């Protein structure tokens, strides 16, 4: 009985405790559950940082590519701009050739001293180098800038001929149109007409034909009466001496590659550029003037020859006869050996006088001298 009562008492106590626990609420601090904000959640924070890092890296790489591409392009353009494009065999047609004189610098000094020279005291050094800078020994050495035209004597009437040239041919210093045909004297000489009359330049009273007398590669051109010239057959050169001591040398040079005068000059003068050269026509041949106007080169590609014209200044470095020098180049033509042998090797004619006739010839219609027959007499000057 006693044991049974003890068990009943234990069950009642347990039931009482259970009921008491069921009816009693836990403290509030034990019932609430706190959740950490998302911005402090470790997983979320790491993911956001990774995305920002990837975006920053992508932007940096994009900027790097753009900047690199820009500088690469600029370097490419700079490299290309430094290249000198020279065609291995450019074609120069007659329409590409201008009849203008090489650019010259005019001096206002009209009181330049005249220099008297004789052939016996004049020595010309020939190197056949084709270089625009020429050294001559008359009374000393003269070296000129290959790219800078030298000073000339004055052109008082602004007709394209220096006063020295007008004195040599007998034109007027104070009148740009000596024969009164409305065309400047220099323009007429450039286009093959006599500035003193209505005739052609080849028939003018102040010019003479000079012809080489070599075993081959002969040529003919116009010179000024009174200017001495010598054939140097061993060197295939003609040496012309002006009445004021300057020298004009015409030489036959080898052109084994049969290239144009333009390419030949650029190969001989690597510092020169194509834009500095002035094309010139000589009959059916073409060539170029050097930048300083003191030399010109005509190419006979079929025969592998270059004909070189060099104007060698006197000791005063004055370019007295630029238009007459260009006249020689433009009137150059090849001739056969038979023609050369039949021509006079030297001229003994006297120079033209400086007396100018006052006769004025009326203006007439202009014609192209190239279209006229060589045996016909022209009555119309050219513009």
Image (cartoon, helix red, strand yellow):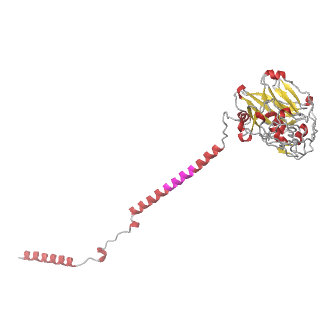
Q: Is residue 381 above or below residue 305?
A: below
The answer to whether residue 214 is visible is: no
Judge whether residue 59 is colored magenta.
yes
Q: Is residue 58 left or right of residue 277?
A: left
Q: Position of residue 231 (x, y in %)?
A: 85, 25
Judge whether residue 259 is colored magenta.
no
Q: Which residues are magenta?
A: 57-69
* Quarter placement of the C terminus: top right
Magenta span dominant secondary structure: helix
Q: Quadrant of residue 137?
A: top right
Q: Residue at x 23, y 79 (%)?
A: 24
Q: Position of residue 349 (x, y in %)?
A: 91, 29
Q: Is residue 2 left or right of residue 363?
A: left
Q: Is residue 250 above or below residue 196?
A: above
Pick the front one: 262 or 271: 262
Q: Position of residue 364 (x, y in %)?
A: 82, 41
* Quarter placement of the N terminus: bottom left
Q: Quadrant of residue 373?
A: top right
Q: Quadrant of residue 207?
A: top right
Pick the front one: 48 or 161: 161
Q: Is residue 157 above or below residue 1?
A: above
Q: Residue at x 88, y 26 (%)?
A: 346
């Amino acid at each position: 009985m006693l044991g049974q009562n003890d068990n009943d008492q234990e069950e009642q106590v347990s039931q009482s405790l259970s009921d008491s626990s069921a009816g009693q609420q836990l403290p509030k601090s034990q019932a609430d559950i706190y959740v950490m904000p998302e911005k402090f959640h470790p997983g979320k924070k790491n993911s956001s940082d990774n995305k920002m890092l990837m975006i920053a890296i992508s932007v940096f790489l994009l900027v790097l590519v753009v900047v690199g591409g820009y500088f690469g392009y600029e370097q490419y353009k700079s490299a290309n701009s430094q290249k000198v494009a020279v065609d291995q065999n450019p074609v120069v047609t007659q329409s590409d050739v201008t009849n203008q004189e090489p650019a010259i610098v005019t001096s206002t000094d009209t009181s330049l001293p005249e220099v008297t020279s004789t052939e016996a005291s004049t020595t010309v050094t020939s190197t056949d180098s084709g270089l625009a800078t020429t050294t001559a020994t008359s009374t000393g050495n003269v070296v000129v800038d290959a790219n800078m035209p030298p000073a000339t004597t004055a052109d008082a009437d602004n007709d394209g001929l220096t006063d020295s040239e007008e004195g040599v041919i007998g034109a007027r210093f104070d009148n740009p149109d000596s024969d009164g045909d409305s065309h400047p004297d220099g323009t007429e000489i450039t286009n093959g007409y006599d500035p003193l009359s209505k005739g052609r330049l080849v028939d003018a009273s102040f010019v003479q034909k000079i012809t080489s007398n070599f075993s081959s590669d002969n040529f003919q051109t116009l010179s000024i009466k009174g200017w001495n010239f010598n054939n140097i057959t061993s060197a295939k050169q003609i040496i012309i001496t002006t009445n004021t001591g300057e020298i004009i040398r015409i030489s036959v040079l080898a052109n084994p590659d049969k290239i144009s005068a333009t390419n030949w000059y650029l190969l001989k003068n690597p510092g020169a550029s194509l834009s500095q050269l002035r094309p010139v026509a000589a009959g059916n041949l073409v060539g170029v003037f050097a930048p300083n106007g003191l030399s010109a080169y005509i190419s006979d590609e079929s025969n592998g020859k270059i004909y070189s014209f060099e104007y060698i200044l006197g000791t005063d470095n004055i370019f007295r006869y630029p238009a007459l020098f260009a006249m020689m180049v433009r009137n150059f033509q090849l001739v056969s050996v038979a023609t050369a042998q039949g021509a006079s090797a030297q001229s003994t004619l006297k120079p033209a006088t400086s007396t100018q006739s006052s006769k004025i010839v009326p203006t007439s219609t202009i014609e192209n001298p190239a279209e006229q027959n060589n045996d016909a007499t022209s009555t119309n000057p050219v513009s």
